[in-house]
């Protein structure tokens, strides 16, 4: 099953309302929460778990996309 990426975050129009381009909304959401996810992954010695932070950011982005479609 494909991942719901939410479509383009910043779609461009060609004048005929055909939208294309830009990063996906999922990527945009993940980028917005990445600083918080990264700081949450910091260990006591100041090291970061980048893989865990990225996974956490996308998990939050996926939850945000699911919340958008709730009625």
Image (cartoon, rainbow, N blue to C red):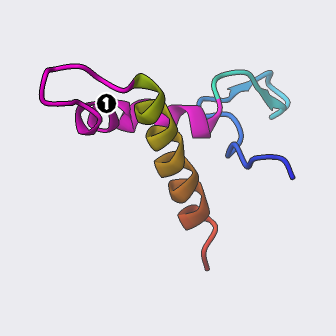
Going by the picture, which residue comes out furthest to the front? 45
Is residue 29 among the parts visible in the rendering? no
Q: Is residue 42 left or right of residue 60?
A: left
Tell me where residue 25 sits by quadrant: top right
Where in the figure is residue 58, as x and y percent of width and height?
53, 41
Q: Residue furthest bottom?
A: 71
Q: Is residue 71 above or below residue 40?
A: below
Instruction: Tell me residue 6's x, y (percent).
Output: 67, 46
Q: Is 46 in the magenta?
A: yes
Q: Note whether residue 48 is visible.
A: yes
Q: How busy is the neighbourhood of tag 1: few (under 14 within 10 Å), some, or many (20 plus)?
A: some
Q: Position of residue 5 (x, y in %)?
A: 69, 42
Q: What span is colored magenta in the figure? A: 24-49
Q: Quadrant of the C terminus?
A: bottom right
- Residue 24 point in image, percent of width and height: 65, 32
Camera-side residue of 24 and 44: 44
Write the residue at 33% across / 38% down.
37
Q: Nearer the viewer, residue 3 or 19?
A: 3
Q: In terms of secondary structure, what is the magenta stretch mainly?
A: helix
Residue pictured at 51% horizontal, 38% vertical: 55
Residue 10, picture quadrant: top right
Residue at the location (45% across, 42% down)? Answer: 56
Give the secondary structure at mark 1: helix
Q: Which residue is mark 1?
A: 38
- Residue 6 painted magenta: no
């Amino acid at each position: 099953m494909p991942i719901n990426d939410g479509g383009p975050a910043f779609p461009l129009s060609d004048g005929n309302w055909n939208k294309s381009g830009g990063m996906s909304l999922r990527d945009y959401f993940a980028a917005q929460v990445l600083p918080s996810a990264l700081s949450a992954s910091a260990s006591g010695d100041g090291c970061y778990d980048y893989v865990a932070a990225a996974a956490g950011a996308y998990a939050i982005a996926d939850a945000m996309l699911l919340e958008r479609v709730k009625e």
